[in-house]
Image (cartoon, coloured by chain):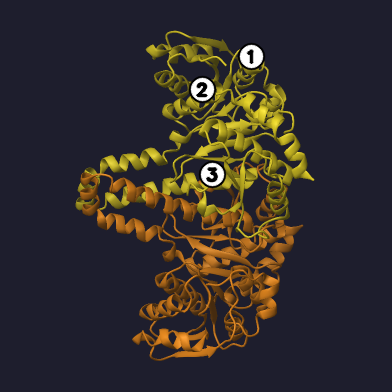
Chain colours: A yellow, B orange
C-alpha cells in the first residue's frame, strides 16, 4: 500500500460543509504531510476555502459536482441522485481506484446505501456495520459496532460483526486476540433475546476465530477497558453511543455550572485548568470522530455531521491510518484464512 | 391514603443485605419521621442491625423468613420458593393490605415475577414496566421506562408504557400534560423499527391521552430536560440506563485522575471541592435509586443491588412519596378515565 494515501472528501456533507471539511483536511496535513486530497463539491466554494490554507497548496485535486445529498434524503432518493452528487462521486473515486478512502460528513443512511451499491459487501459478509473507537479507562480504546447501520440483526449478522470488529482491533489497536463481547442486559447465559443467546452460542463454539469471546457485557461496563470489541445490533449500538455522548456533555455542562457557581470555585477551576483541559480532550466527541463502515470492498469513513475542523482532522487521521495499514485487505485475509470455516462451524 | 405509610422491606436482598437495608430505613426516618417499617428476613441478623439505630426504636416490625431468593435464581425457581422467602413475604404483605409499598434490592427478574403473580397487572395493562427518574439539565427529572422488565415489546406495550409513564410524571413531578417521547435512533418519522413507527402513529392519533406526544428522541438528548417521559423497550432502556451510569462513573474517574495528576491541579481541586461535591451529588446513582414497577395493583420499588444505605434511604423516599400520593389509584383512574377509550382509538 502507498505511504501517501489519497482521500476522497465529500466537501458538501455535514452541518457546516466545505469550511470544516477543507479546514480539517488542511489541519490533517500537519499529521500526515504527504496525504493527498480529492475534494468533491461546489468548485467555487471549495476553491475559496482551499485558498485560505497554505498547507493545501499542493497535492490537492478538485472535482466539481452539481448536486448534494441532503440530510433529509431517504436512501432510495440518495441512490437515484448519487451519480452527480459530491457523496456519490467521492465513493465512485474509491471504486475506480483513484482514492484509497472516502470521507463524508453527510447523511449516514445515504452514505451506506450508495457505498453498498458501489463497493459491494465483502465475501462472507451479509451486511456492513458502522464501527468506531470509544475511549476507555484502559490502555487502548474499544471498538464498538454496529452503531446504526442495521436496526435489526440476526445472530449470523452479530457473529460477522464480531469477526470484522476483531480484525479492526487487530489491525488498528495491534491486539493479536481481541477480547470480544456481546452487549446485553445481563451477563448470565439466559439473559436478553434469543438472537443474543444464539449469537453467543455460535461465538463460544467457534474457538478457531482469532478472538477471545468473553460473553455478555452490560452498558455500565463499556468504558472500563475490560474488552477490546463490543458487538451489538445497530439500534442498541446507536442508543449506547449517543447516550455516552449525551451523558459526557451533560457532565461537562454540570461541571461548568458547578465550577462557576462561586468565586472560590472559579478560582479553583482556573488553577486546575490543565486537568480540566485533559478532561475536555478525552470527552470531546471531535477527538473520537470517524466511524468506519466495515464489510465493504473499500474504505468508507463517516465524520459526525456536527464535527468541527478538528473533528474532521481526526476522521481523516482514521482514514489515513487504516488506508496505510491496508485494513480492507487484512480483514479480507482474516475472512479467508479463519472465519469462513469458523463462521460456518459457528453457524451450525 | 394514610400519612404514615407502612413499607415492607425485603431485608435480605442486594449485594450487602440487612446492614444497608436496615441502615437505609433508619436514615429514611430523618426524611419521614412517621414512616412505619416491616422487615422480612433472618430475625437474629435484622434484630442486631435494628439495635444499632436509635431511630428504629419504634414503629418497626420484624417477620422472620427462612429462605432468600438469590441473584442466581431464575424467575421460575424464585416463584417456586417465593412462599417462605423474604422477598415473597414482603410482597405478600402488600397484597394483604398490611403494607402500602414493598422495597427490595434483590434479583429484579424474581421480584417482577413474584409481584406479577401476587399483585396482578392493572386492568388495561398487558405487561408491567420498570421506571425510574433520571437527572436532567432541566428543572425536573425525567421518567424513563421500561428499564429492563421486557426485553422485547410490541407497539401496544409501548403505548401502555407511555400512558403509565405520563401518569407517573403527573403524580410525582406534578406536570399536568407530560411531554412524552419514544427512544429511537433518529427523529425522522421513518427511522427505527416498524414497532416504533407503529407505536408513534398510535400515540400521534391518541390526542385524548393526558400527555403531549413529542415524537422520537435520540440517546444524546436523554438528559437535556426537553421531555418529561421517555418510553422504550426494556432492552434499549436497560442499555441506555446502564450506559448513563457507566459514563458518569467513567467521567468521575477521569476527573479524579485528571485533578490529582499535578500539585497545582490538586490545589485547584481542593479549592473547588464544593463544586466537585455538587457534581458528585448529581451523578451518584445512590441519589437516583428506586425503580418503580408500574402497571401492578400494588407499589413495588426496586433498590439497586449495589446501593449503599444512602441509596436505600432514597429508594424508601420514592416508595413513601408514591404511597402518600396514592399513585396506584391515580394511574388506575387515568386508565379508567382516558386511556381505555384513547388506547383503543390509538390501537386502531
Residue A261 higher or lower than A12, as above or below: below
Residue A141 image offset from top left, x and y in percent: 48, 39
Whichever of labels 3 and 2 marks the residue nearer the N terminus, that label is: 3
The furthest residue to the front:
A208
Q: Mark 3 points at which residue?
A: A241
Which of pointers 1 and 2 lies earlier in the amino acid sequence? 1
Chain of the residue under the numbered disc 2 shown in the image:
A
Q: Is residue A134 above or below residue B161?
A: above
The residue lying at 53 percent from left, 36 percent from top is A175
Locate the C terminus of chain B and report the quarter of the image it occupies.
bottom right
Q: How far apart are marks 3 and 2 (CA)?
A: 23 Å
Name the outermost residue toward the top. Answer: A58
Element under disc 2: helix
- Reading the image, the residue beneath label 1 is A97
The dot on residue A320 is: 2
In the shown orientation, is residue A131 left or right of residue A137? Answer: right
Location of residue B171 in the rendering, given as x and y in whole percent from the top left corner: 52, 70
Displayed quadrant of residue B23: bottom left
> How would you rate the neighbour count of disc 2 (Cα within 10 Å): few for under 14, some for 14-19, many for 20 or more?
many
Which chain letter matches label 1?
A
Local crowd size for mark 3, using a 10 Å CA cut-off: few (<14), some (14–19), many (≥20): many
Say whether residue B81 is visible. Answer: yes
A57 displayed left or right of A63: left
Amino acid at each position: 500500500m502507498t505511504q501517501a494515501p489519497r482521500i476522497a472528501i465529500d466537501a458538501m456533507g455535514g452541518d457546516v460543509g466545505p469550511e470544516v471539511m477543507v479546514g480539517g483536511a488542511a489541519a490533517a496535513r500537519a499529521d500526515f504531510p504527504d496525504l493527498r486530497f480529492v475534494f468533491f463539491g461546489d468548485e467555487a466554494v471549495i476553491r475559496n476555502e482551499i485558498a485560505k490554507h497554505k498547507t493545501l497548496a499542493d497535492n490537492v485535486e478538485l472535482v466539481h459536482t452539481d448536486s448534494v445529498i441532503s440530510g433529509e434524503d431517504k436512501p432510495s432518493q440518495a441512490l437515484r441522485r448519487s451519480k452527480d452528487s459530491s457523496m456519490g462521486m467521492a465513493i465512485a473515486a474509491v471504486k475506480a481506484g483513484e482514492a484509497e478512502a472516502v470521507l463524508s460528513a453527510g447523511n449516514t443512511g445515504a452514505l451506506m446505501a450508495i457505498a453498498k451499491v458501489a463497493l459491494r459487501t465483502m465475501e462472507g459478509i451479509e451486511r456492513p456495520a458502522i464501527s468506531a473507537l470509544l475511549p476507555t479507562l484502559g490502555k487502548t480504546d474499544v471498538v464498538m459496532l454496529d452503531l446504526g447501520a442495521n436496526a435489526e440483526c440476526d445472530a449470523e449478522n452479530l457473529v460477522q460483526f464480531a469477526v470484522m470488529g476483531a480484525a479492526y482491533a487487530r489491525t488498528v489497536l495491534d491486539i493479536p486476540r481481541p477480547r470480544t463481547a456481546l452487549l446485553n442486559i445481563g451477563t448470565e447465559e439466559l439473559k436478553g433475546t434469543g438472537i443474543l443467546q444464539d449469537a453467543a452460542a455460535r461465538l463460544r463454539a467457534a474457538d478457531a476465530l482469532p478472538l477471545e469471546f468473553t460473553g455478555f457485557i452490560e452498558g455500565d461496563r463499556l468504558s472500563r477497558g475490560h474488552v477490546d470489541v463490543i458487538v451489538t445490533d445497530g439500534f442498541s449500538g446507536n442508543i449506547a453511543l449517543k447516550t455516552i455522548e449525551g451523558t459526557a456533555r451533560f457532565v461537562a455542562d454540570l461541571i461548568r455550572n458547578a465550577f462557576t457557581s462561586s468565586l472560590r470555585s472559579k478560582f479553583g477551576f482556573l488553577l486546575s485548568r490543565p486537568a480540566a483541559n485533559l478532561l475536555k480532550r478525552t470527552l470531546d466527541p471531535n477527538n473520537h470522530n470517524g466511524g468506519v463502515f466495515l464489510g465493504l470492498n473499500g474504505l468508507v469513513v463517516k465524520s459526525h455531521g456536527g464535527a468541527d475542523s478538528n473533528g474532521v482532522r481526526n476522521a481523516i487521521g482514521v482514514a489515513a491510518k487504516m488506508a496505510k495499514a491496508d485494513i480492507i485487505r487484512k480483514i479480507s485475509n482474516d475472512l479467508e484464512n479463519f472465519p469462513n470455516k469458523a463462521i460456518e462451524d459457528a453457524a451450525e
